[in-house]
Image (cartoon, rainbow, N blue to C red):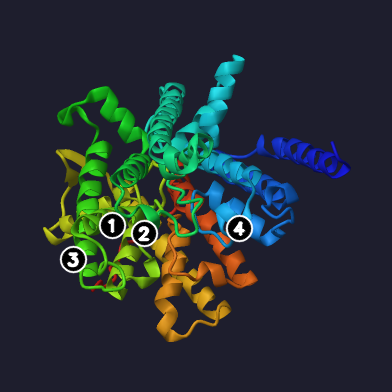
């Protein structure tokens, strides 16, 4: 082992040891945030190594930090091309970071503990509950096993399918590697691809398109939903969470397909040279991928302004709670819509599928949405300043800010041209987007403080 490698390993060991002492006194939200921070730092160190670069020279600290953050936050935004800038070693590091970020470090920790015969303590169970967003603290170890099993089965089957599809073009060895990388990236809604144009070459390929869609849709629905479906297999027996996620997600996927298909059919820059089947495939894929997947089969920058703005809306909504995607989540959107409809109807209980939704859930949903909107607007404002963007390019800035915050990874082309300060802003945004709303929601849920002072009620005019 070289001297530099020894120094890096010593540094990593000392860092882990110091953080282990600090984390013992942390609450679950702070613990989750700290672990993600440490993983990003470790990934940055590894990606900075010359061995991680395709040309044998380091890609630089800032670009390595950007890539590591994007991978661990399962975002997909890149400032250097994954397929050409990184060696196999670097790509494997990215793949591992994606798996940890999407599957959850506590789920992986449970698997290791089970193999080593270790017991899972109360604090570990609380952290598992928050990282998986489970509604109950019971059966969390069993849930972690289900999660790991689902991930292995889905990614394994997809790897086999994509290997068979690509082996004639690439050879068996490379086909297996490409299939595994894109299966992990898709299932975890990361959006990293080994082709510079993402999956544009496979716009009319049903095997690739359908396989990738199934992967990121399943990951986006969330492990809680998948486990609930496997256990109960009856709509009547499903939990309210599962019913809401399936219904609203279905509406959003169908709506995304129809809107993109109708709008882009008038766009010569995207659909003019495509057959009807390819148009359907492209619209189906592009209508679903903004929900946090990050892949694309048509150039986002060439789409109509209306389509781009519609994608911003889909990115902001994101996937489902407990899944590998980001955004404010379909659950949050549903709760606020139900509360709004209920207000228009004159008030009363907020309910769905004959189940009442309590006021605390509505307030948490409102807090997540308001904080998310503020974050996106602040990031867009900062990027407008740092990137010296003119008024006609504001949609690119808003698109980039929303994509980073919602961990989607789509871009209209601004990512490649970001300034150093812009890269730092996006790095922080990806980190906040991955952990912010989640941590905020649980912090609000777990810290119930009753005021010791009773104030007289008064009115504020609304509307």
- Furthest toward the top, the residue is 117
Say whether disc 3 or disc 4 marks the residue closer to the N-terminus: 4
Along the line of sight, the residue nearer the viewer: 124 or 80 = 80
Say whether disc 4 or disc 2 marks the residue closer to the N-terminus: 4
User: Which residue is located at x 52 percent, y 49 percent?
Assistant: 73
- How far is the residue under mark 1 from the one under mark 3? 12 Å
Say if residue 87 shows up in the picture. Answer: yes
Where 270 falls versus 183 (above or below)?
A: below
Q: Quadrant of residue 9?
A: top right
Q: Neighbour class for label 3 at 10 Å: few (<14), some, many (≥20)? A: few
- How far is the residue under mark 1 from the one under mark 2? 17 Å
- How far is the residue under mark 4 from the one under mark 1? 29 Å
Judged from the image, the secondary structure of the residue bearing numbered disc 1 is helix
Q: What label sits on residue 66 in the rendered view?
A: 4
Q: What label sits on residue 119 in the rendered view?
A: none
- How far is the residue under mark 3 from the one under mark 2? 19 Å
User: Which residue is located at x 26 percent, y 74 percent?
Assistant: 268
Q: What label sits on residue 262 in the rendered view?
A: 3
Where 347 falls versus 168 (above or below)?
A: below
Judged from the image, the secondary structure of the residue bearing numbered disc 3 is helix
Which of discs 1 and 2 lies nearer the camera? The answer is 1
Q: Which residue is labeled 2 in the image? A: 315
Q: Which residue is labeled 1 in the image? A: 282
Horizontal and vertical percent position of residue 143: 41, 26
Judged from the image, the secondary structure of the residue bearing numbered disc 2 is helix
């Amino acid at each position: 082992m070289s001297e530099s490698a020894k120094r890096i390993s010593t540094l990593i060991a000392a860092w882990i040891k110091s953080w282990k002492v600090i984390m013992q006194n942390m609450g679950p939200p702070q613990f989750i945030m700290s672990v993600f921070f440490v993983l990003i730092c470790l990934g940055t160190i590894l990606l900075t190594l010359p061995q991680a670069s395709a040309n044998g020279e380091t890609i630089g600290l800032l670009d390595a930090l950007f890539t590591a953050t994007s991978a661990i936050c399962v975002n997909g935004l890149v400032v250097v091309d994954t397929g050409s800038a990184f060696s196999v070693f670097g790509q494997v590091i990215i793949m591992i970071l994606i798996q940890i970020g999407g599957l959850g470090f506590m789920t992986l920790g449970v698997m290791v503990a089970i193999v080593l015969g270790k017991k899972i303590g109360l604090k570990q169970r609380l952290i598992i509950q928050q990282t998986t967003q489970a509604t109950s603290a019971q059966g969390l170890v069993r849930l972690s096993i289900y999660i790991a099993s689902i991930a292995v089965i889905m990614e394994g089957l997809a790897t086999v399918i994509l290997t068979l599809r690509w082996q004639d073009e690439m050879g068996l060895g490379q086909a297996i590697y490409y299939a595994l990388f894109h299966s992990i990236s898709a299932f975890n809604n990361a959006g990293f691809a080994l082709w510079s144009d993402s999956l544009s070459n496979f716009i009319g390929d049903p095997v690739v398109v359908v396989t990738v869609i199934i992967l990121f849709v399943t990951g986006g629905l969330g492990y809680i939903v998948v486990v609930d479906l496997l256990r109960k297999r009856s709509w009547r027996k499903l939990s309210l969470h599962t019913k809401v996620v399936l219904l609203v997600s279905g509406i959003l996927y169908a709506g995304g397909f129809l809107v993109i298909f109708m709008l882009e059919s008038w766009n010569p820059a995207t659909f003019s040279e495509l057959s009807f089947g390819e148009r359907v495939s492209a619209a189906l894929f592009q209508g679903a991928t903004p929900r946090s997947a990050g892949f694309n089969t048509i150039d986002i920058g060439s789409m109509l302004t209306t389509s781009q703005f519609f994608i911003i809306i889909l990115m902001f909504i994101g996937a489902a709670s407990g899944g590998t995607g980001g955004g404010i989540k379909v659950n949050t959107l549903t709760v606020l819509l139900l509360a709004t409809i209920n207000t228009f109807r004159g008030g009363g209980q907020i309910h769905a599928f004959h189940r009442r939704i309590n006021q605390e859930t509505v307030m948490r949903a409102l807090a997540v949405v308001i904080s998310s909107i503020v974050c996106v607007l602040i990031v867009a404002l900062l990027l407008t300043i740092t990137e010296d963007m003119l008024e006609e390019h504001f949609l690119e800035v808003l698109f980039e800010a929303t994509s980073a915050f919602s961990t989607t990874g789509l871009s209209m082309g601004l990512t490649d041209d970001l300034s150093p300060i812009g890269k730092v802003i996006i790095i922080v945004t990806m980190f906040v987007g991955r952990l912010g709303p989640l941590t905020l929601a649980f912090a609000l849920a777990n810290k119930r403080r009753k005021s010791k002072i009773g104030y007289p009620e008064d009115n504020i005019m609304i509307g």
